[in-house]
C-alpha cells in the first residue's frame, strides 16, 4: 500500500510550485557593517551517510571554495543537526548545509543566518518526500498494522526523519510514543535503513525524491542495501528542499562572494558538483528564508504535539 496525504496544506502546495513569494528575511540583531572576515571559514554538514563517505563527497567542494574565496574553508562533519544549529548560533560555523526542519529550527531559535541556495532535483523540482519503509516480505499493509512494533526515526531535528513523520502519524490518530513499543532515533538516514535490515526496528522514516533517487537508492549504489527489499507504506506531500545558509554577521562582500562561488560551481566544475549528488541533481538555485516559513509552522505544530502528549 502506498498512500499520500497532505503535509502542510497550502504551504506544501507552495513548495511544490517552487518557493513562497519573496519577502524580507528575518531581521538579525547583529549589525554587519563593521564585521570582519574571519581568517578561516568553517563549512558544516550533517552526515546522511557514514562520515568517510561525507568527507570523500564534500572535500572537493570545500577545496574549491578555498580557492575561489582566497580563504581556507574547513569541512566539519557535525554529529547531529543540533550541533550545526548551535555552531551557527555561536558563530563557530560560517556556512552550513541544512535539512529544512533544522534550518527552520535555527531560524526559530534566533541563529543569525540566511539561506542563499537550494538543492534542485534532477527533474527541476525543489522538494522531496518523507516515506515510511518496511521490509518487502513483512506482513504490514498499512501503518496501523504496526501497533506494538518498533519505529525507527532519524534525528529530532530531521524533517523527513522525524518532524514530517510525527505530523503524519498525528493525522492518522497515532501517538508514536504510545502506539509503538519503542521509538528509536538512529542518528542518520543510512543507520535507519540498517536498523530495519537488522530487525532492530520494523518501520523507518527516510527521505525519498522518487523511485529513481532516495537515500535507499544511494545505499544501493554503494552496495549497502537493495531497493527492492523494501516497501513504502506512506509518502508525504512535497517538502521544500534543503538549503545552504551563511551567517549574516559575515561581511556583506564575503557573503556575496560565497553565494556567487557556490552557485557557479556546477558550471565551473561540473565533475565536483555531480559527485555531490551522484549526478542526480540540477544546479543549485537561489533561495531566501521566506521559503522555509511553512517548515517553521510545521515544527511549531510538532513541538506542540509533543508537549501535549508528553
Image: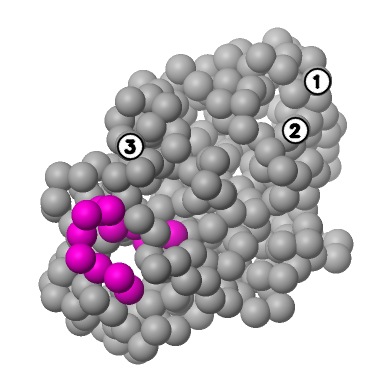
Identify residue for label 3: 226
Identify residue for label 2: 283
Say whether residue 140 is magenta.
yes
Whichever of callouts 1 and 3 sits on the residue coming sooner in the sequence is 3
Using the rendered view, name the quadrant where residue 71 is placed. top right
- Is 148 placed left or right of 69 in the picture? left
Cβ–Cβ under 8 Å for marks 2 and 1: yes
Q: Residues within 10 Å of mark 3 (few under 14, many from 20)?
A: some
- In this view of the protein, which residue sits in the foreground, 191 or 2? 2
- Is 237 placed left or right of 14 in the picture? left
Alpha-carbon span between mark 2 and mark 3 = 28 Å
Residue 7, how many percent across, how many down? Answer: 56, 74
- In this view of the protein, which residue sits in the foreground, 212 or 79? 212
Residue 163, how many percent across, how many down? Answer: 44, 67
Magenta stretch, residue numbers: 131-142
Alpha-carbon span between mark 1 and mark 3 = 33 Å
Under circle 3, the secondary element is loop
Identify residue for label 1: 267
Amino acid at each position: 500500500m502506498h498512500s499520500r496525504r497532505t503535509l502542510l496544506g497550502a504551504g506544501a502546495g507552495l513548495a511544490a510550485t517552487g518557493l513562497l513569494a519573496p519577502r524580507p528575511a528575518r531581521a538579525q540583531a547583529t549589525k554587519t557593517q563593521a564585521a570582519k572576515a574571519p581568517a578561516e571559514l568553517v563549512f558544516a554538514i550533517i552526515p546522511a551517510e557514514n562520515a568517510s563517505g561525507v568527507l570523500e563527497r564534500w572535500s572537493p567542494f570545500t577545496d574549491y571554495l578555498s580557492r575561489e574565496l582566497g580563504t581556507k574553508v574547513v569541512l566539519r562533519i557535525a554529529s547531529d543537526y543540533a550541533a550545526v544549529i548551535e555552531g551557527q548560533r555561536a558563530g563557530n560555523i560560517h556556512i552550513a548545509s541544512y535539512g529544512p526542519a533544522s534550518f527552520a529550527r535555527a531560524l526559530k531559535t534566533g541563529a543569525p543566518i540566511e539561506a542563499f541556495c537550494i538543492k534542485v532535483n534532477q527533474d527541476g523540482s525543489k522538494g522531496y518526500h518523507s516515506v515510511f519503509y518496511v521490509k518487502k516480505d513483512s506482513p504490514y499493509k498499512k501503518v496501523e498494522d504496526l501497533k506494538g512494533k518498533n519505529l525507527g526515526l532519524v534525528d529530532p531535528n530531521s524533517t523527513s526523519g522525524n518532524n514530517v513523520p510525527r505530523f503524519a502519524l498525528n493525522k492518522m490518530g497515532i501517538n508514536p510514543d504510545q502506539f509503538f513499543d519503542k521509538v528509536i532515533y538512529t542518528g542518520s538516514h543510512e543507520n535507519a535503513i540498517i536498523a530495519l535490515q537488522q530487525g532492530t526496528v520494523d518501520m523507518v522514516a527516510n527521505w525519498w525524491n522518487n523511485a529513481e533517487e532516495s537515500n535507499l537508492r544511494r545505499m544501493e549504489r554503494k552496495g549497502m542495501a537493495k531497493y527492492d527489499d523494501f516497501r513504502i507504506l506512506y509518502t508525504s506531500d512535497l517538502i521544500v528542499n534543503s538549503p545552504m545558509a551563511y551567517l549574516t554577521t559575515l561581511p556583506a562582500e564575503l557573503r556575496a562572494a560565497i553565494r556567487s562561488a557556490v552557485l557557479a560551481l556546477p558550471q565551473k566544475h561540473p565533475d565536483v558538483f555531480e559527485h555531490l549528488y551522484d549526478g542526480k541533481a540540477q544546479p543549485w538555485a537561489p533561495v531566501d528564508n521566506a521559503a522555509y516559513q511553512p517548515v517553521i509552522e510545521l515544527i511549531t505544530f510538532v513541538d506542540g504535539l509533543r508537549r501535549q502528549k508528553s
